[in-house]
Amino acid sequence: MLAQTTPGERAPVLVVLGSWLRSLRLARQLRLLDVARPGISPPTLHRWELGCTPAPDLVGEVLASYGVADEEIEWMISQIPSRSRGKRSCPVFTDWGGTCAQARFTAVQRLATDAVEFGSVLLPTSVRTREYAAAVAAPGRTSARTPEQHRVVLVDEAVLYRPVAGPSVMYRQLSHLLTLLDSEHPHPDMRGGVRVRVVPEDAPPRPFQDAGPIVWMTALETGLLCRPGTAPSYLAAEAQCTDVVESLLDAARTLGREPSRAAVARAQTHQLSVLRQLPAPAVETASGGAQP
């Protein structure tokens, strides 16, 4: 079951830094003991990865040992709140840190125990096929999910019809969504995989639908409302709009699998009707050589 929002236990920047530190270490297949050095014990490293405030100069040494560029290190160090300011003194963090900003966002996603994504214009990245991603010039599916994670992807029904790619690409993208829906575990609290839910076009508007593409995550016991992009932003509970978060979580809990599957199937039927109006080669391409 999705957790309710509670006051953040850690400043967002510390959640991002801790998640990134862990991701960098695991990507190099290193133990805490392998990274430890004079003045930086394994327990200290572990606390930093859990979102505790690090010593800027020492955490800079660790990041340098992982091969992080100097400008990225300087950026993250400049964002670390001082211990005297309190753990919730910086409830908002916008990551303008350059090329590593997306890697840090992915690290937080991977560490999250619960996540709800909402796509208002495009499908969220975690459910895109590579063809769809190429058509919108953005990354496709990532490995940001873990077997222990509870993830729900919310999509406005209009997105299923938006012609961001050709009908054959959309047909296969919708087939992928149907596969996700059909492979979903029947128990709502089961972790792993992803649950796709469609927000009906004729339903009363909900506050989160006006917030644009957003992701709500629980990472390091901190509820974060995030805006993905080249410079992701992270808001702790006290900086979040309560109506947006509550309506987002309510939709993730209450929208059903069968109505969502029916909505995707209708959109796929629409794409098929478009394909049948095209020359035969285009129809054949949609399903790899045979008419779908």
Image (cartoon, rainbow, N blue to C red):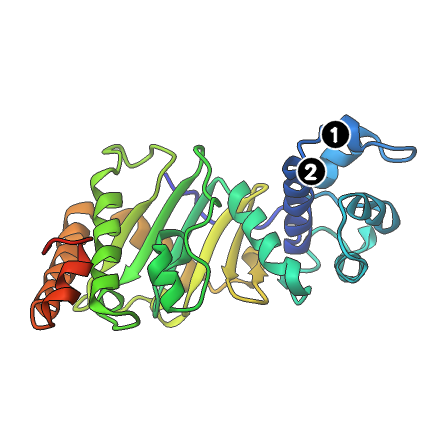
**Which quadrant holds the N terminus?**
top left
Residue 169 location (% of width, % of height):
26, 62
Residue 182 location (% of width, % of height):
20, 41
Relative to 257, is 37 on the left or the right?
Answer: right
Residue at screen point 54% across, 51% down: 106
Relative to 153, is 145 on the left or the right?
Answer: right
**Which quadrant holds the C terminus?**
bottom left
Q: Disc count in the image?
A: 2
Relative to 175, is 34 on the left or the right?
Answer: right
Relative to 72, is 264 on the left or the right?
Answer: left
Three-letter amino acid code of the residue under disc 2 = Arg
Q: Earlier in the sequence, mark 1 or mark 2?
A: 2
Report if residue 255 is visible in the image.
no
Three-letter amino acid code of the residue under disc 1 = Leu
Cα separation, mark 1 vs mark 2, equals: 8 Å
Label 1: state its secondary structure.
Answer: helix
Reading the image, the residue beneath label 2 is 25
Please rate how many residues cluster around mark 1, counting C-alpha atoms within 10 Å: few if below 14, some from 14 to 19, many from 20: some
Reading the image, the residue beneath label 1 is 32
Looking at the picture, does residue 189 appear above or below residue 19? above
Report if residue 27 is visible in the image.
yes
Looking at the picture, does residue 92 appear above or below residue 188? below
Looking at the rendering, which quadrant does residue 80 occupy? bottom right
Q: Are marks 1 and 2 in contact (CB under 8 Å)?
A: yes
Residue 155 location (% of width, % of height):
30, 60
Residue at screen point 28% across, 50% down: 196
Looking at the rendering, which quadrant does residue 46 occupy? top right
Please rate how many residues cluster around mark 2, counting C-alpha atoms within 10 Å: few if below 14, some from 14 to 19, many from 20: some
Residue at screen point 45% across, 33% down: 148
Q: Which mark is residue 142?
A: none
The outermost residue toward the right is: 38
Residue 42 location (% of width, % of height):
79, 29
